[in-house]
Amino acid sequence: GGPLEILQLWVNLPARLKMTAPHYTGLQAEEIPVAKLAGGRVQLHAVSGEWWNVKGPVQPLTDVQLCWMEWSAGAELELSIAAERTIFFYVLRGSLRVNGTTVTTHGLAEFGEAGDLLHIEAKEDSVLLFGHALPFREPLVAYGPFVMNTSEEIRQAYTDYQNGLFGSDELL
């Protein structure tokens, strides 16, 4: 028994990789390496990429760096992110202050290509989903569960889905 938390992420791909065979990576908490930061007051769980010499087990098709962090109240940390990268900052639980702005439970802070230095402070015990990647700089069309680059590709995705062309028994 006990509580169960599942976080499922879908990662967009550039046009050249959109038709790549689907792939699923299921991980248990104990399979994700942890870096202890800020004197142990921040635990960084590396999902993909390398964080403080800890490498995440997921090998994405693009350069997506992703982790989640558990923060103790009062913890502070500075992260340096290259200016050309897009930052993803989602507070799953708690309250964090980043560069002077407070982000609370289920809050998303979008920095675009703000880059450089992020100063983060935990106002209370908190959990943060954090990542960064190089932007694709391609058109984006989203409709329902599909994300493609053109409206025609969206229509084709729906047609393929309706004709049973998505997925296979091999994935089950």
Image (cartoon, grey):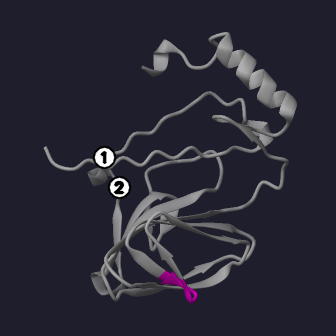
Q: Identify the image quadrant of residue 94.
A: bottom left
Residue extent of the magenta highlight: 97-101
The residue drawn where x is 57% and y is 47% is 60
Q: Residues within 10 Å of mark 2 (few under 14, many from 20)?
A: some
Which residue is at a point 86% across and 28% down the rendered structure image?
Answer: 152
Please identify the quadrant where the N terminus is shown. Answer: top left
Q: Position of residue 52 (x, y in %)?
A: 45, 74
Residue sitting at the far left = 1
Query: In the displayed structure, does residue 47 sit left or right of residue 137?
Result: left
Q: For the point 84% across and 50% down, which residue is it?
A: 138
Relative height, residue 99 to residue 164 (above, below): below
Q: Amino acid at mark 1?
A: Gln
In space, the residues marked 1 and 2 are separated at their CA atoms by 7 Å
Q: Secondary structure at mark 2?
A: loop
Instruction: Find residue 55 and report its image quarter.
Output: bottom left
Residue wearing tag 2: 32
Predominant secondary structure, magenta span: strand
Query: Does the stretch in magenta take in 126?
Result: no
Asked which secondary structure carries label 1, the reply is loop
Quarter holding residue 160: top right
Residue 167 screen position, x and y as percent: 56, 19
Whether 98 is among the magenta residues is yes
Image spot of residue 171 (x, y percent): 47, 21
Residue extending farthest top: 163
Indicate the position of residue 151 as horizontal and vertical percent values. Answer: 85, 33
Q: In the picture shown, does residue 145 fall above or below 125?
A: above
Q: Are marks 1 and 2 in contact (CB under 8 Å)?
A: yes
Residue placed under numbered mark 1 in the picture: 28
Q: Residues within 10 Å of mark 1 (few under 14, many from 20)?
A: few
> Disc 2 residue type?
Ile
Query: Where does the C terminus fall, quadrant-wise?
Result: top left
